[in-house]
Image (tube, helix red, strand yellow):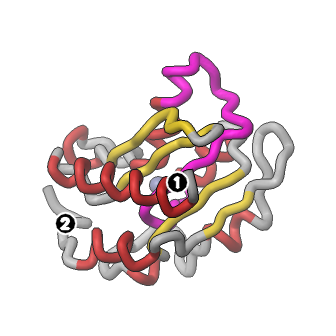
Amino acid sequence: MTREECMHKAIEIAKESEQNNGMPIGAILVKDGEIVATGESSVWPDKDPSGHGESNCIRSACKKLNDTDLEGYILYGTLEPCGMCMSTAAWANLSEVYFGAYREDVLGNNYEIDNWSSEEASKNMHTVGGNSMSVTGGILREECTELLKDYVGWEKK
Ligand SMILES: [Zn+2]
């Protein structure tokens, strides 16, 4: 699967997430061209502030694989990952993360860290296994931005 095909799948998950009363944010985890796990945003449905699509995806994969070491797996998310999800990825030993929309593309999206750039942050991060972690944004940027363009539910439900 190409990066764009993977991101298309993450976009589908984001749409499912919204249908399930979550935010329109989705993530998938891939290895050797196969989707190993998916993650929807569950913040509102579960009343769980840590229920982000990316972290949920990693959690689901670890449970399925009965392991916390996801070295060699690649995470795709529709929105720039926050600090918590970046840390979860590092704890899971992921070395590659791709995302679609940048934080600044999405109005109303206020992360906990001002001027946060996951691409910049990744330059100073390494995983629990000691690997560097690369984070690259802009994969299907417009489509991913479109998902959240009219979303107004950041602070409700
Ligand atoms: Zn997050």
Quarter of the image for residue 119 reads: bottom right
Q: Position of residue 99 (x, y in %)?
A: 52, 64
Query: Compared with residue 3, is residue 45 higher up or lower down, i.e. above or below?
Result: above
The residue where tag 1 is placed is 76
Distance from disc 1 to disc 2, alpha carbons, whole Å, reads 23 Å
What element does badge 2 sit on? loop
Q: Nearer the viewer, mark 1 or mark 2?
A: 1
**In the image, is residue 80 part of the stretch drawn in magenta?**
yes
User: Label 2 amino acid?
Assistant: Gly
Kindly indicate the quadrant of the structure image that contains residue 78. Answer: bottom left
The residue to which callout 2 is attached is: 153
The vertical placement of 70 against 82, above or below, is above
Q: Residue at x 75, y 55 (%)?
A: 133
The residue lying at 50 percent from left, 22 percent from top is 63
Q: Quadrant of the C terminus?
A: bottom left
**1 and 2 marks in contact (CB < 8 Å):** no
Residue bounds of the magenta highlight: 61-84
**Which residue is outermost to the front?**
1
Which structural element holds mark 1? strand
Q: Is mark 2 within 8 Å of ligand 1?
A: no
Crowd around label 1: few <14 · some 14–19 · many ≥20 (10 Å) = many
Locate residue 30 relative to residue 14 in the image: left or right: right
